[in-house]
Each structure stands twice: as C-alpha cells, then as structure tokens.
Image (cartoon, rainbow, N blue to C red):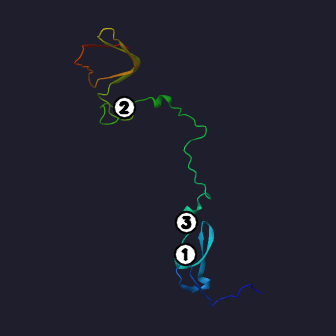
C-alpha cells in the first residue's frame, strides 16, 4: 500500500501565480540548491541563480604568486626601446630613434649663489640630452652655475 493516493485527476494551485495546474505538473522552487517549500508551475519556474551559492563555491581570485622567480633576462630588461614619433633612428625592434641622444650617470651638482656666505650643494642623479638648454634667470642676484660630474 502507498502512503498517498495517486491523484491522477487532482488539481493544485501554483504558490506564485495562484493558477490551477494538475498536481503532477507542479514542481518545487529551488533556491540556493534547496527547495524553498513553494510548488510552482513549470512555466513560471525560476532557475537557481548561482549568486545564491556564495560561500558554497570557491570564488577566490589570488593575485600574488607563491615563491616567485625573477626574469632571467637581465640585459634585455635594461635596453632602451623607443616608439614613433620619439626619435627617428632604427633599433633592434624596428623603432626609429634618430635625434634621441640620451646619456645618464650618477654624479654631483654644485650650485653656488653669489651672496655673502651662501653656498648650496646638491647631490643626485643627472641626465643630459640634446633637446634643449638649461637657463636660470633671477632678477635679484647674479647666479653662476657650474656642472661637474
């Protein structure tokens, strides 16, 4: 013996719309992977949304690497590559760099301002290029600039 009658002619009502369906055509509504207790018609059934499964599915997106190794191409990482419209000659990569003359070195720059007992010394990284000239103008005192290094 079964616990329930077969109900092949029985009607049921949709918990969402209130429309009448055959009882065998009503299906449980699923949320977060579990039935929520509502019986709805197949035409108004909502698919289970994956956003309800937060915490059940691994959503980690790690950015850092464990035990990273540096790039072995040390010399290649120190090369200069240019692009149009900068320069104008040809590099190994096909970029044009004519007129792009650059040099750089670590040195010392002394700036001496001619005033009674006033001297300023600056130390740092300097670079030169053929793009233009450096000029310092002031209306208060005469300045003598000498660059060494």
Residue 45 numbered mark, or none: 1
Q: Position of residue 115 (x, y in %)?
A: 29, 10
Residue toward you, 76 or 146: 146
The kind of secondary structure element at disc 3 is loop
Residue at numbered disc 3 = 49
Q: Position of residue 84 (x, y in %)?
A: 31, 36
Q: Are marks 3 and 2 in contact (CB under 8 Å)?
A: no
Residue at numbered disc 2 = 91
Q: Residue furthest bottom?
A: 9
Give above or below for 120 relative to 46: above
The kind of secondary structure element at disc 2 is loop
The kind of secondary structure element at disc 1 is loop
Residue 110 numbered mark, or none: none
Closer to the observer: label 3 or label 2? Answer: 3
Give above or below for 120 relative to 91: above
Q: Position of residue 134 (x, y in %)?
A: 27, 21
Q: Quadrant of residue 56?
A: bottom right
Query: Which residue is painted at 54% across and 72% down in the image?
Result: 46
């Amino acid at each position: 013996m079964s616990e329930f009658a077969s109900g092949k002619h029985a009607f049921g009502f949709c918990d969402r719309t209130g429309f009448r369906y055959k009882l065998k055509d009503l299906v449980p509504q699923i949320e977060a992977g579990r039935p929520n207790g509502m019986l709805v018609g197949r035409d108004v059934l909502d698919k289970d949304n994956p956003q309800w499964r937060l915490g059940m599915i691994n959503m980690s997106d790690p950015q850092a690497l464990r035990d990273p190794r540096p790039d072995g191409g040390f010399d290649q990482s120190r090369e200069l590559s240019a692009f149009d419209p900068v320069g104008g000659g040809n590099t190994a990569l096909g970029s044009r760099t004519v007129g792009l003359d650059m040099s750089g070195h670590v040195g010392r720059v002394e700036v001496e301002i001619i005033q009674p007992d006033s001297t300023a010394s600056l130390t740092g990284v300097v670079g030169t290029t053929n793009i233009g000239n450096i000029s310092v103008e002031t209306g208060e005192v005469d300045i003598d600039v000498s660059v060494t290094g």
